[in-house]
Amino acid sequence: MRVLGILGGMGPQATIDLYQKVLNYTPATRDQDHLQVLIWSDPHIPDRTAAILYGGMDPSYALCAGAAKLVSGGAECIGIPCNTAHYYLAAVRRAAQGVPVLDMIELTAKAARDCLGTGARVAIAATQATLATRLYDSALASVGLVPMVPSPPEQVIIDDLIFGPSGVKAGFVDANNCRRFQELCVRLFSSGAEGIIAACTELPLLAGSPSTMLPIIDPTSILAQALVSFGLKD
Amino acid sequence: MRVLGILGGMGPQATIDLYQKVLNYTPATRDQDHLQVLIWSDPHIPDRTAAILYGGMDPSYALCAGAAKLVSGGAECIGIPCNTAHYYLAAVRRAAQGVPVLDMIELTAKAARDCLGTGARVAIAATQATLATRLYDSALASVGLVPMVPSPPEQVIIDDLIFGPSGVKAGFVDANNCRRFQELCVRLFSSGAEGIIAACTELPLLAGSPSTMLPIIDPTSILAQALVSFGLKD
């Protein structure tokens, strides 16, 4: 078994979601069957959206310091439960000094291709900053999927679900927001999406239990599976 | 704000429960309002019950190594979401080199006294190892409460809820176990308990949302409040 590292806090509830999914995917009947995990949950990392879109403080220093902390604490593989933060992945990988840092976006694009088949139209429900980086557009295109960006009114709903005064980052993982996210997904499917990526780690918190009926793809679950698979290797 | 450390993994689900309660008690409307937390979740720490009752491998080395890891990673205060592990608190405190390690059992005894009043009879729902250490008996007696130990048939139910093949450590935080824990509590109240301490961190997972109606005292919540209070100090 190998030690997992989680570079989290963006937000903290999404970090818990990732660790919960790591536990769920680990075959275990007692404490000792589970993996050792070092979590640095740093909600003080400057806002990624503010940095990318509005020239806010650069979060890469704090991200790199966090990765270095995990490496010196013994992490043998690192996952980052924040899609937008993947814009800084190259810098984080340099800071990790050879310890692998998983690319949640690349893993998600491959999982979406396996789930939906080449050529499918995939909506990206994400922060405006993640969309601006075009990380998902490139990753999806490179596996033969067709990225779809939400319309401006749909994006208003997504931003509000994530950052709004009654959104997930303000602590509202409630029935009302779950219903609003479900309505948004229905709208995206009606606009021609064949699958939806819940491409901000706050959004899977509103998606409930994984459903095999609805093609809503959860990057946090995919990252958790990859971490567990790495951790259980001999 | 100060950096919190969590020495967890005993079990990992209880570690998530503690961190979730830390988030719940933190006044926050955005990521940056939350505290920085370093979590070392080490489910490989040898079983505390086996060590205390049956001469199993001593967990104190792994506990001390974990505390040292948290201190070198910048933790300014440490909480341990495992009641039985508090038997090794003195050793962990030495390993923490002056960084305060909170005593969940002492904090819980004081909270129970504040909630129930001096002289109240308090049942200790815990592992057999925690009972054998008499940590709660001493802590409760020193604040003027009267400790009550479950009867042997009640203890069989508690052990099964924690360690059984369908217990919490095997991943079963389900409606059936919640109902069984509720029935156990009713039984303890019928036997004369005026309050119950859910004195194994797996048990509050079966207690649902905190209730102001039923005097079931949750050491994980009390530890979370103490950590947040420390973290938010100037």
Image: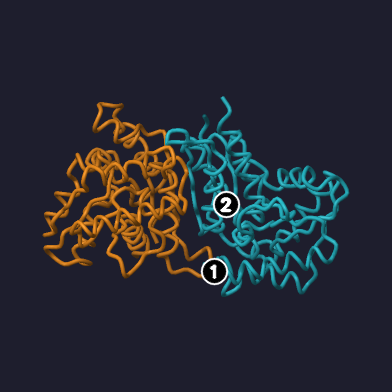
Chain colours: A cyan, B orange
Q: CA distance from mark 1 to mark 2?
A: 29 Å
Q: Quadrant of residue A229?
A: top right
Q: Which residue is nearer to you in this view: B184 or A205?
A: B184
The kind of residue on which mark 1 rests is: Phe
Q: SS of the residue at dot 2?
A: helix
Q: Position of residue A9 (x, y in %)?
A: 53, 55
Q: Residue at x 30, y 31 (%)?
A: B50
Please tell me which of labels 1 and 2 falls first in the chain.
2
In the rendered image, which residue does mark 1 sit on? A172
Drawn side of residue A142 relative to residue B55, left or right: right
Q: Which residue is nearer to you in this view: B209 or A137?
A: B209
Q: Name the front one of labels 1 and 2.
A: 1
Q: Quadrant of residue B217?
A: bottom left
Drawn side of residue B181 relative to residue B133, left or right: right
In the rendered image, which residue does mark 2 sit on? A61
Q: Position of residue A233 (x, y in %)?
A: 58, 28
Chain identifier of the residue bearing label 1 in the image: A
Judge the density around disc 1: few (<14), some (14-19), many (≥20) Cα neighbours within 10 Å.
some
Above or below — where is B88 with respect to B223? above
Q: How many marks?
A: 2
Q: Are marks 1 and 2 in contact (CB under 8 Å)?
A: no
Chain identifier of the residue bearing label 2 in the image: A
The kind of residue on which mark 2 rests is: Tyr
